[in-house]
Amino acid sequence: MACEDSGAAQRKRSQSTAAARMPVTIAKSQGVTVLTLTSDPQSSCPPLCQILKGLCCSPVCCSVSQHLRRVQKTSQSLLGALHIVIGMLNIGLGAIPFNGSELSPFWLGGMFILFGIVSILSEKYPSPCLVFLNVFLNLAGVGFAIAAIIIYSLNIEFMNLWWMCDDDDYLSPYNTRSPQEDVWMEKCLEGKAIILMLKRGIIAILIILSILELCVVISSAVLGIKALRSSEKEENKSTDDPEQYKKLLEKVTTSPTV
């Protein structure tokens, strides 16, 4: 009796361990996908969070797909390298005109670098979960790139150096200055115009980089979506191909019986 109880307890532990390892079971048949969730009654997370956790930790989603590797080739690495270069240029060039007064180039550059890292990882380890994450981040990157274009365009439009040279007093008809002060003011205004032109030129480069980033995120997202769709079609073809069942049936019928 004790052996039976210990055997039943061991079976329960093995079942609970298997349920903990595989909380979500995915079954595909004729274009229909069935998800079976083994919920954990001791977990405080709602069932939706458990489904998402099970999908992210499932071997089906986290295992490397050779088909995705063949479809993506080296495109995501190239796009990821462009992401990183654009992000580093945003941080480096953005520090010149803004001089720490605005943090937009820094957090935008950091996000672009993050997109590049995920793109490279999605090619090196092309699991469906990582490819989907790459697509999601690049779709979000479309909004970040558009925001960067708008922010830089507003900065180049309203940029001024009002604190330099005090030119309002210089242009006033009621203000009298010595010839030396006039020469100094003219040189100051010339330097102010040059600095303003340089800063606007750098911001114009940042706008061009943001437009390039918009093209890169769209390209990366489109390639990821095509790869996922191709992988799904390949799985459906492999499961619904009648030739495989025919070959298997012929193999079974022709095999000698023992």
Image (cartoon, rainbow, N blue to C red):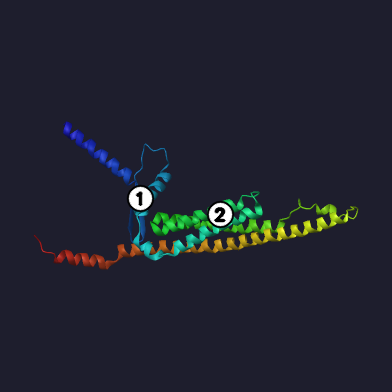
Instruction: Judge left or right: residue 47 versus residue 101.
Output: left
Q: Quadrant of the C terminus?
A: bottom left
| Type of amino acid at the residue the image marks with label 2 | Gly
Local crowd size for mark 1, using a 10 Å CA cut-off: few (<14), some (14–19), many (≥20): some
- Residue 143 showing in the rendered view: no
Residue denoted by label 2: 109
Where residue 115 appears, x then y in whole percent? 49, 56
> 83 or 13, which lies in front?
83
Q: Specify the quadrant of the image occupied by residue 159.
A: bottom right
Percent position of residue 125, x then y: 38, 57
Q: At numbered mark 1, what does the secondary structure look like: helix, strand or loop?
A: loop
The answer to the question of whether label 2 and label 1 lie on touching residues, with beta carbons closer than 8 A, is: no
Residue highlighted by disc 1: 58
33 or 109: nearer the eye?
109
Alpha-carbon span between mark 2 and mark 1: 33 Å
At label 1, the amino acid type is Ser
Query: Is residue 166 toward the left or the right of residue 227 in the image?
Result: right
Q: Position of residue 220 (x, y in %)?
A: 48, 62
Instruction: Where is residue 44? Give x, y as percent.
Output: 41, 37
Residue 41 relative to residue 94: left or right: left
Q: Residue 164's mark?
A: none
Give whichever of discs 2 and 1 has the lower sequence position.
1
Q: Give the class, few, some or many, for how many residues have Cα within 10 Å of label 2's Cα (few <14, many ≥20).
A: many
